[in-house]
Image (tube, grey):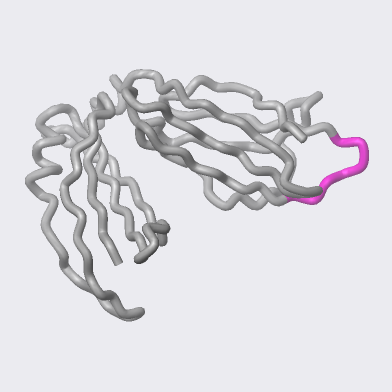
Amino acid sequence: MMLEVKSFDIEGNEKLITQVFSNVNASDAKKILSVRKDIEALSSKGGGFIQLRLLDENKQILSENLYWFADEKGNYSGLNSIKKSDLNVTSRYLKSGQIEVTLTNPSGGPVAFFNRISLVDKKSSKRILPVFYSDNYISVVPGAQKKITLDYTPQRGEEIAVTLEGWNSKERIIQVSK
């Protein structure tokens, strides 16, 4: 497997920290490297993000985590000053009771941080429940795309839409395409 570690500052500038190949068994726990210096560098500039990804031999993502870090004083001042992201959002029906939402963050901007997707009634804007999300409170690094699947029980005559709200993303309603 390959461990990929990247950092992103508050402006969205990416730095590859390492790509390490390792054999990993199901019950293994391994220390690969320390990222302390990278975190300290981010903290000295108002904070930032560390992305860890575990990929298989075909470069398919098995696990992905994004961590955000405070400034040198332990405050999240960078998150308070992060610029608005230009996150592109589309949604489409996969089949009855299943919708796919695609979040695309263009290169050159900040991390689109902590985005929440909701399924709503198009007329009343009330949330539809229950809905099962493949992921939620999603952060998308610059130049990346994430696809989220929503599973729900359709009701007769119901018209739906998807809403998005995020830390630094514009709140909006997204129409679901067929």
Quarter assignment of residue 2: bottom left
| Horizontal and vertical percent position of residue 143 | 37, 33
Q: Quadrant of the C terminus?
A: top right
Q: Residue at x 31, y 80 (%)?
A: 25
Q: Quadrant of the N terminus?
A: bottom left
Q: Is residue 101 magenta?
A: no
| Number of disc labels | 0
Above or below, comparing residue 59 to residue 144 in the picture: below
Extreme-left residue of the structure: 37
| Horizontal and vertical percent position of residue 104 | 48, 32
Residue extent of the magenta highlight: 152-158
Q: Residue at x 23, y 50 (%)?
A: 5
| Horizontal and vertical percent position of residue 3 | 26, 59
Query: Which of these two is toward me, 108 or 50?
Result: 108
Above or below, comparing residue 31 to residue 132 in the picture: below
Extreme-right residue of the structure: 156
Query: Which of these two is toward me, 18 or 148?
Result: 18
- Specify whether 71 is left or right of 108: left
Q: Residue at x 60, y 22 (%)?
A: 172
| Horizontal and vertical percent position of residue 164 | 57, 30
- Specify whether 50 is left or right of 178: left
Extreme-front residue of the structure: 58
Q: Residue at x 71, y 27 (%)?
A: 175
